[in-house]
Amino acid sequence: MINGSCLCGTVKFEISGEPSSLSYCHCSRCRKAAGIFSAVLIGKAGDLRVTAGQNSIAKAPTDPEWNLERCFCQKCGTSLGDMATGDIYVVAASALDDDPGIRPTVHIHTGSKPDWYQIDDNLQKFEGDYVS
């Protein structure tokens, strides 16, 4: 079980099962929400369960093509990621309280990163999502 929460502790969640990836996302949504990029944990939507503060999760639509909503705690502003979208969850790794047991393997949406930021590691890179 992987536990997570917001800064003020109002929103709490747990993830059962194995996450499918831990990625660095450079899309414009993640850059604006988290800074240069966001570390995101991705897995099966059914493995994510909000255990406290469901009513304190605010949602802001960010991408009509993908039907994504940026989720955050409305009390403290902690970014929670896109939470469950369709068959997957996308959770901001910064909200995790526990080690997810996997390490980052890829940079996604590098085509959206700022020109002044250099990626200086050997992780696989994709201009868009994993399939681009």
Image (cartoon, rainbow, N blue to C red):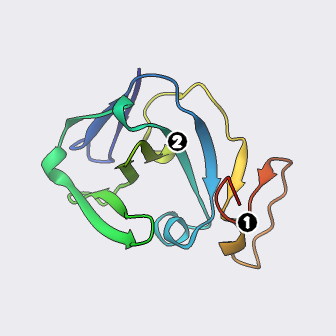
Q: Between label 1 and label 2, give the one nearer the viewer.
A: 1
**Residue at (69, 77) in percent of width and height:** 114
**Residue at (59, 24) in percent of width and height:** 101
- The image position of residue 92, as x and y in percent, is 46, 49
**Residue 3 occupies quadrant:** top left
Q: Secondary structure at mark 1?
A: loop
Left or right, 56 with respect to 19, comes to left
Please tell me the numbered disc located at residue 127. Answer: 1
Q: Secondary structure at mark 2?
A: strand
Would you name the residue on which mark 2 appears?
41
Disc 1 to disc 2: CB gap under 8 Å: no
Q: CA distance from mark 1 to mark 2?
A: 19 Å
Please tell me the numbered disc located at residue 95. Answer: none
Tell me the quadrant of the picture where the N terminus can be found. top left
Pick whichever, 19 or 72, lies toward us. 19
Name the residue type under label 2: Leu
Left or right, 9 with respect to 41, comes to left
Circle count: 2
Pick whichever, 105 or 86, lies toward us. 86
Please tell me whether residue 16 is drawn above or below residue 41 in the rendered image. above
- The image position of residue 95, as x and y in percent, is 42, 44
